[in-house]
Image (spheres, rainbow, N blue to C red):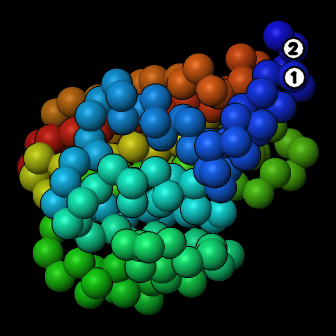
Amino acid sequence: MDSRSFQDHFFKKAKISGYRSRSAFKLIELDKKFKFLKNGIKLLDVGSFPGGWSQIASKKIKKGKILSIDKKRIQELEGVKFILGDFLEKKSKEKITEHFNSNIDVILSDMASNTTGNKNLDCIRTNQLCIDILNFSKETLNKKGTVISKVFMGEDFDEVKFTAKKYFKNIDFFKPNSSRDESREIYIHCSGLST
């Protein structure tokens, strides 16, 4: 299956399943491997538009607390509170902390930098977003909590690994089948804060 028909396959599958994005399948695969979507947890979905990951989380988590944030508004989802804002801004982080009022169990990020056409620059910017997530998790995550974040193989990948190892006991990398073969996208799974 070539790249375009592969992409169409997951796009069609998402439509049939009623998912908001083809990336919903990535989260399903990640959860199947690492089993972090559990009842009663507090979950933050960063860069959530159009809401595919929050949608999957809301189906899986009962009696939990799900907060979703993005610069673009998502359509309402039952069981999901949404903040319109830029995660990188201090006031957004304050709103997140206020909402949970205690440590978060799972932080998800499928954020990628807006593409510039320069693959190396896009890679650096997206990996910096991942580092921002890791730094934020150090302050807000439950000791036994989990972070899942998109990262790109290439520039700054070593810095992502270095930051993750500084904060977490367990680090894994996983490329879902629903990611395109030629994509440099991979996901980091971190669990168990070491400090």
Residue positioned 71% across, 17% down in the render: 181
Check the image and report above or below for 162 versus 103: above
Identify the residue under disc 1. Answer: 5
Which one is in front, 21 or 138?
Answer: 21
Residue positioned 37% across, 87% down in the render: 95
Q: CA distance from mark 1 to mark 2?
A: 6 Å
Let me know if residue 86 appears in the view.
no
Identify the residue under disc 2. Answer: 2
Horizontally, is 99 left or right of 161 in the view?
Answer: left
Quarter placement of the N terminus:
top right
* Amino acid at pointer 1: Ser
* Amino acid at pointer 2: Asp
Check the image and report above or below for 91 versus 162: below
Residue positioned 19% across, 54% down in the render: 39
Horizontally, is 24 left or right of 132 in the view?
Answer: right
Q: Which mark is residue 78?
A: none
Q: Are marks 1 and 2 in contact (CB under 8 Å)?
A: yes
